[in-house]
Amino acid sequence: MGKYLLKLPKMGESIAEATITKWLKEVGDIVDVDESIVEIATDKVDSDVPSEFQGKLIKKNFEVNDVVKVGEVIAEIETDSKDNDKSKIISREKENELITDNDEEITVSETEVMNVPSIDLLKNEKDNTEIDKSDKFFSPLVKNIAKKENISQQELNLIPGSGKEGRVTKQDILNYIESKSSKPVHTPISEPFTEPKPSLEDQIIELDRMGKIIFDHMSNSKKISAHVQSFVEVDVTNLWEWRDRYKNSFQEKEGQKLTFTPLFIDAVIKSLKDYPILNSSIIDEKIIMKRSINIGMATAIENGNLIVPVIKNADHLNLKGLTLAVNDLSNRARSNLLKPEEISDGTYTVTNVGNFGSIMGTPIINQPQVGIIAIGVIRKTPSVIETNNGDFIGIRKKLILSHTYDHRIINGSIGGSFVKRVAEYLEDWDMNQII
């Protein structure tokens, strides 16, 4: 008999973890090949993890609502190694034990142990004594972090936990330490820290899973990238008139709306071809120029959060193809029907803040990308119109483009020129093209 370790699979370069939402099998259940064992939520998209082999589920390493990193062992399945791929099975004679952050034990093969550099550290943390006695349970790892950061038992008791039964997880205490260090100190150092207490009139709102993911992603992006912005005003009067001319016929022919979003994306794609450095990522201090242009488009969903589905190889689509792709991904995003691969591997992001009535915005870069553009609301404005017969005042339809880019590799000249090029493509819209 052997044992198959079911790990959280890699689901795209931007997805590093998932939350367990439901176990479909219990310990002792028989599992068939390709049968789903557990449901997970990854960056706002629900999915499931199937087994590659047939066998019996003998151990679950995580509970519902636990956060699992890509590559971590979710469960263990006892299987007949004679009928399965032996490279993915470990024998009982070569098992080694690891102490994990949630105080459970998992078994890994000798080769897998070599890929886990923190084994000794975790074991040492397991042996640490408690900082103080408390009625509330804290894992040894959390207690050890509290000791190193000089966090008192009183402070520790006040940290809200996101783990099972309100347990304080490693991420909870790290988030607390980060927020504490960023707060200005207005009291003498000798005074003990006291968490502000809400009054009876205050409303306390707990962040949901998606909110916590967005919280972490946005915070990390500001730490990683040097954000800087450039702004350009764009006259989209011709674009407006062109869409107005074809929107009804497109609706009748395709049964779908012709929105401004694919028109904006079309201009962004052309500009990325002119400035390919914006279609790149930074990995280990190296610039990776992406061959494919995969456009992420921020989409608002019912609960007020945003999700970013990705149009893969968007530069291979004509205007009609872009329109159909935008409508399809937007509709399925709002219905929570996107697949994990449909929100990963984006190379540049577009967000239409004008949908919310905003004149402009300063969006945060979607890591590991190096740029994102925000499109403001279209407004009628009085403008100076230059002609051969002199200048006059007229009413034009205009918007503001806001380009946020990573100043570590994108200087102001390139960042400003890129957004200006997008504006030029929109202003010089071909009024004779047919969709």
Image (cartoon, rainbow, N blue to C red):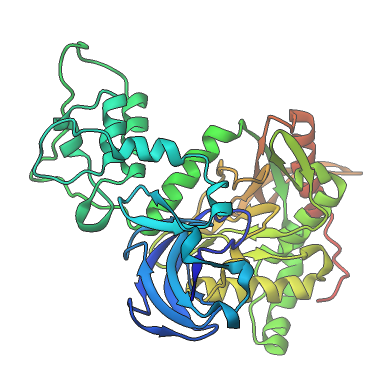
Answer yes or no: is residue 35 visible.
yes
Q: Residue furthest front?
A: 93
Please tell me which residue lies in front, 20 or 390.
20
For image coordinates 37% across by 26% down, the residue present is: 182
Q: Residue furthest right?
A: 388
User: Where's residue 146, x and y in %?
Assistant: 27, 31
For image coordinates 51% across by 66% down, the residue present is: 91
**Direction from residue 210 to residue 165 in the image, left or right:** left
Say above or below: 61 vs 146: below
Say above or below: 250 vs 230: below
Please tell me which residue lies in front, 58 or 7.
58
User: Where's residue 281, x and y in %?
Assistant: 71, 44
**Direction from residue 58 to residue 237 in the image, left or right:** right
What is the quadrant of residue 397 in the picture? bottom right
Say above or below: 76 vs 141: below
User: Where's residue 141, x and y in %?
Assistant: 31, 39
Question: Looking at the rendering, in which quadrant would you find the C terminus?
Answer: bottom right
User: Where's residue 94, x and y in %?
Assistant: 50, 59
What is the quadrant of residue 263 in the picture? bottom right
Q: How many marks?
A: 0
**Direction from residue 47 to residue 59 in the image, left or right:** left
For image coordinates 83% across by 54% down, the residue present is: 291
**Direction from residue 153 to residue 420 in the image, left or right:** right
Answer yes or no: is residue 385 visible.
no
Say above or below: 73 vs 123: below
